[in-house]
Image: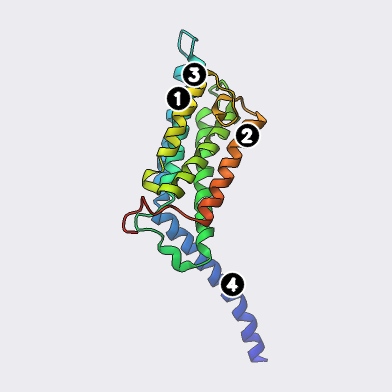
Amino acid sequence: MNTLIHDESVVPLAGRDARSSLARLLRLHLASRRVPAALLALAACAPLLQWAVRSSLSQTSLSGARTSAQQLSLLLEAATAAIVSAALHGPFGEAERIAGRRLPLLRLATALLLTVAALAVVYVGVLGTAMPAGELSALRDTAGLVGIGILSTVLVGGHFAWIGPVSYWVLGAYALTENWHTPWTWPGRPGGDLGADLCASAVFAAALLAITLAGPGRQGVSGS
């Protein structure tokens, strides 16, 4: 009888210990990726985005004002993507490899947390600004740019992951000027455009899969 009671009490205790261990591991993982600093940097992008879009759209000459507003918005969206991608690697590599099967879960959780933060910041930044392509287009553009940034992290490491979003910003800004309409340059498409939504979503989904399974590239990580 005593043995039975003892065994029944061990199971919930073991479960609580496992959950506590996982929560502690996730907290340490986020701290090692400087996620709190990344969240502060993302938060600073919201007022900058509001100011950039409103100042562009309030020009006395409306010629090119819409394009200018979209280009500036895209620039700050690329900045949020660069922040997210840079925070997905640790300065000393992935010490959590000793966590075994938990490491992919940690990578995915970090990527999703930072992506949600970036989308929230961009939405607050464009809210009420009368964005030419609509507020939903800014969320789509950000998701696609974050995907490009994450893929860059996987390929070249976190130190140089900014190259992907910045390069796409140059391409997207040019596409806006030249009125390109291919869905792969989704910033030139209006919000709700199915082709653009699918392209941006495909890039983001591929990026999540890549960072979860492969992790950040080692070329940009010192000491690895």
Q: Is residue 136 visible?
A: yes
Element class at badge 4: helix
- In the rendered structure, the answer to whether residue 223 lies left or right of residue 86 reads left
* Label 1 close to label 3 by CB (< 8 Å): no
How crowded is the residue under tag 2: few (<14 C-alpha within 10 Å), some, or many (20+)?
many
Q: Quadrant of residue 224?
A: bottom left
Q: Is residue 194 above or below residue 11?
A: above
* Mark 4 vs mark 1, CA separation in Å: 49 Å
What residue occupies the far left of the structure in this picture? 223
Q: Amino acid at mark 3?
A: Thr
* Mark 1 vs mark 3, CA separation in Å: 12 Å
- The residue identified by callout 1 is 72
- The residue identified by callout 4 is 15
Q: Quadrant of residue 40?
A: top left
* Mark 4 vs mark 2, CA separation in Å: 41 Å
- The residue identified by callout 3 is 177
